[in-house]
Amino acid sequence: MNGPLHGIRVVDFGRYIAGPFCAALLGDLGAEVIRVEKRDGREDRTLISLGENADGSPREGAMFLQMNRNKRGLTLDPAHEKGRDVVRRLIAKADVVIANLPGETLKSLGLDYASVSAINPRAVLGVATAFGLEGPYSNRVGFDGIAQAMSGATYFAGTEEQPVRAAAPWVDFGTASLLALGIVSALRARDMTGKGQLVEGALLRTAMTFFSTTLIEEDVLKLGRKPTLNRSQTAAPSDIYKTRTGWITVAINGDPLFRRVARLIGAPEWIEDKRFASDKSRGDHGEIISARVAEWCAARSSDEAIKAFEGARVPAGPVYTMREALDDPHVRASDILTTTDYPGIGKAPIAATPVKLHGTPGEVRRRAPTLGEHSDEILRELGYSAEEIEDLKRSGVV
């Protein structure tokens, strides 16, 4: 069955996560995606490398396999005069162009919206930058961790002595997902107007959106909260607890869940204690509540504690290592992960389409491309003859 974006052509000039994963999501939903990268491979091709080649060079990395499924690959030097012609032809046939580059770099490569729309007024340009295309930081470069830090989230996730950056690049993945939503919306708008438009995502915008409730509270109440690591300050118990066999996490909000926890751990008097009358007051006294729950957990194995919480219908779960997460029976029984088979690496798990459409589901139809795997094929589709393709190769363009 064709996906809902069947017939849409996407040209992906992105690198790392925000741009490439956005394009991958569109590809999962049926779009045809062409990845454009340097002749020797972009910086992101071997990041988190999955081994070495016979000559000792790094193999493709985990990030590349995840972000570039459902794409054909074209190598290109877009700054070369002949490469610019290839870019123009790509844009002319595209429904969507994606690039996560600073504004000045976009202009220098002819990938800014003015240049793209002049070639193809129906094209949607999806751009992901660190700070946005306007403002004093518009030409600064940045990665996920920078946005985490500048949003306040890194400060609040740690302790007063040590801020903590999340290991998962949630800002990048969030920006990619929101950019994909914007692009699909722009394609729908094009159905009505006949015109494309610029769709802009930014890492800092995403980070501050995801952390916005804490920022709103600070601006209105000016509490100046200090970080307390894993313990929530707005409800309790909501923390990570050590058991006899490992660690578990418990997360609750609301009176009904709190009453269940109080009864479960043998503290029914908490239900009438005015210190614990609301989420706010429980958050204010969270250290007291967490200490008692920690004592209860420490006397039990992780399995015993989680089973008891589940029996009381209280949200709780294990703190897994990466290996444990991969081996979890629910993960293995579901379609959260799928398998890709890449030359020289073999089979590896990648995350499948993260949103399930039950009528027209997303699908990983092809592995990520090897370097320049489809260059000749794509150039022929753009109208280049065999002689012209050879000339592009001799000139160092592809």
Image (cartoon, grey):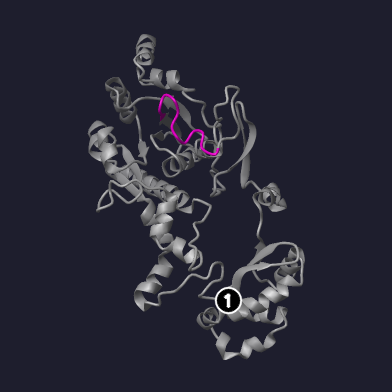
Q: Amino acid at mark 1?
A: Ala
How many numbered marks have been drawn onto this rendered protein structure?
Answer: 1
User: Is residue 40 rendered magenta in the image?
Assistant: yes
Residue, far top: 387
Residue under the image location 71 percent in, 68 percent down: 310
**Is residue 29 shown above or below 343?**
below
Provide the residue span drawn in magenta.
Answer: 37-48
Residue 241 horizontal side relative to residue 5, left or right: right
Residue at image mark 1: 236
| Mark 1 neighbour density, 10 Å: few (under 14) some (14–19) many (20 or more) | many
Q: Considering depth in this image, is 258 or 63 the residue closer to the camera?
A: 63
User: Measuring 43% from the left and 25% from the top, which residue is drawn there?
Assistant: 74
Tell me the element at label 1.
loop
Residue 66 position (above or below residue 395): below
Return the x and y of residue 14 as percentages of the image width and height: 40, 37
Q: Residue at x 36, y 39 (%)?
A: 99
Q: Position of residue 53 (x, y in %)?
A: 59, 25
For the N terminus, the quadrant is top right
